[in-house]
């Protein structure tokens, strides 16, 4: 406990972990984590749109003791924040998926594993201890799709998350400029960059080079270039409403559709059996022209908020952002990059530290606002300069 308190004093904000992580992760891996796509306007738009939302505190409430435990899909969680999926997180820090799953299991929050992870569902499912969610990228081959769903079920994952917002791979220019390729070009610049990050290099040597472990059983070659080509051809580009229906029939647990920004897509997904809608613009990594996810959340909530559970990510950097998303209609919030900052900075203890920061910051924000319960947040008034984007005001969605 004293160690956790010392960490809170030394690294009191997620930005502190971000700075430390950047000094420990090689340049090409850091650019992979931090980059968006295009001119990275969507990346900036997410955080700017969140920051312009202010809330009016309520006073004269007596002693305010926030209760932040919540229930989602029949499971109790310690707080309404979970770890969003990040593909190949093991490139950023070796073994990060296992560390994050173990933290999620011990802290009673969800961890969502990507299909394109550097760890297998079988390992992560046991570590997460019932708190594992599995993010399914649409596989073109029915046999691969059904096997991934079966593996998730057999490994103890409680929620299946079907990703809708990757019809094709995005162009991530910063990755290209950083020299990130699959497999990596092991030239002098590559060796110079990893030797300047000895902790990452030692951890990688111990664990082995990051690979698409969740998908390796479906390919016949160990050559990374051929694997990458196969995955690019086998995943994505096949999603339609019939596909959603097939996944619904194959998975008998809670099913969430991730990457929804429009009310009509949300409505149709719910009609076809989705138990949750995850409002997200892929953290600004997929389409630079997409609106900020928080600007879309309210309209989705108005359309389907009384029929389904609403989840949110994209730009979340602290407990106040959780409050902002809950106020817009979310039932639960996820963050990706902050948890990888923690792991990259401090290892598995860093993952727990990020959870502690969200826990403390959320409670503080609710105390400042006069909210004892998460349900009190929706009744708060917005600041006078805030607005909710409307169909006639879409040009104002920029950050």
Image (spheres, helix red, strand yellow):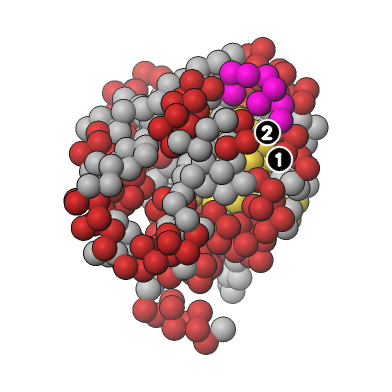
Q: Which residues are magenta?
A: 139-147
Q: Is residue 285 left or right of residue 71?
A: left
Instruction: State the image coordinates of residue 102 (x, y, percent, origin top left).
Output: 62, 62
The residue at the point 37 percent across, 37 percent down is 182
Quadrant of the snapshot with the C terminus: top left
Magenta: main secondary structure: helix
Is residue 386 among the parts visible in the rendering? no
Whether 221 is among the magenta residues is no
Write the residue at 45% across / 36% down: 223
Viewer-side residue, 38 vs 275: 38
Nearer the observer, 177 or 293: 177
The x, y position of residue 237, in whole percent, is 50, 17
Give the secondary structure at mark 1. helix
User: Where does the N terminus fall, quadrant-wise?
Assistant: bottom right
Where is residue 306 drawn, in percent x and y?
Answer: 67, 32
Q: Which residue is mark 2?
A: 148
Label 1 belongs to which residue? Answer: 152
């Amino acid at each position: 406990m004293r160690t956790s308190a010392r960490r809170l004093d030394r690294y009191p904000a997620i930005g502190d972990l971000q700075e430390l992580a950047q000094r420990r992760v090689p340049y090409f891996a850091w650019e992979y984590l931090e980059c968006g796509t295009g001119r990275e306007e969507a990346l900036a738009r997410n955080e700017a749109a969140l920051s312009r939302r202010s809330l009016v505190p309520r006073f004269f409430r007596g002693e305010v003791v926030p209760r932040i435990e919540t229930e989602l899909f029949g499971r109790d969680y310690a707080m309404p924040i979970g770890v969003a999926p990040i593909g190949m997180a093991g490139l950023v820090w070796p073994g990060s998926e296992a560390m994050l799953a173990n933290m999620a299991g011990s802290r009673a929050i969800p961890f969502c594993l990507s299909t394109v992870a550097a760890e297998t569902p079988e390992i992560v499912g046991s570590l997460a201890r019932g708190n594992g969610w599995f993010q399914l990228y649409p596989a073109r081959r029915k046999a691969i799709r059904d096997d991934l769903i079966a593996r998730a079920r057999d490994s103890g994952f409680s929620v299946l998350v079907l990703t809708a917002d990757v019809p094709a791979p995005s162009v991530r220019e910063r990755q290209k400029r950083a020299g990130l390729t699959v497999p990596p070009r092991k030239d002098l610049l590559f060796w110079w960059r990893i030797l300047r990050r000895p902790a990452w290099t030692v951890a990688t040597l111990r664990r082995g080079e990051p690979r698409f472990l969740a998908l390796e059983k479906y390919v016949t070659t160990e050559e990374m270039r051929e694997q990458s080509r196969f995955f690019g051809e086998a995943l994505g580009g096949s999603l339609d409403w019939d596909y959603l229906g097939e996944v619904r029939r194959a998975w008998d647990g809670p099913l969430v559709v991730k990457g929804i920004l429009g009310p009509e897509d949300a409505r149709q997904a719910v009609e076809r059996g989705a138990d949750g809608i995850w409002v997200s613009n892929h953290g600004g990594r997929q389409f630079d022209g997409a609106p900020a996810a928080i600007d879309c959340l309210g309209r989705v909530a108005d359309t389907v908020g009384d029929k389904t559970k609403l989840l949110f990510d994209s730009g979340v950097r602290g407990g106040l952002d959780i409050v902002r998303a809950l106020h817009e209609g979310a039932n639960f919030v996820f963050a990706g990059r902050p948890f990888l900052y923690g792991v990259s900075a401090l290892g598995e203890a860093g993952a727990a530290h990020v959870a502690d920061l969200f826990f403390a910051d959320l409670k503080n924000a609710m105390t400042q606002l006069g909210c004892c319960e998460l349900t009190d947040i929706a009744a708060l008034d917005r600041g006078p300069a805030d607005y909710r984007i409307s169909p006639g005001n879409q040009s104002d969605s920029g950050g």
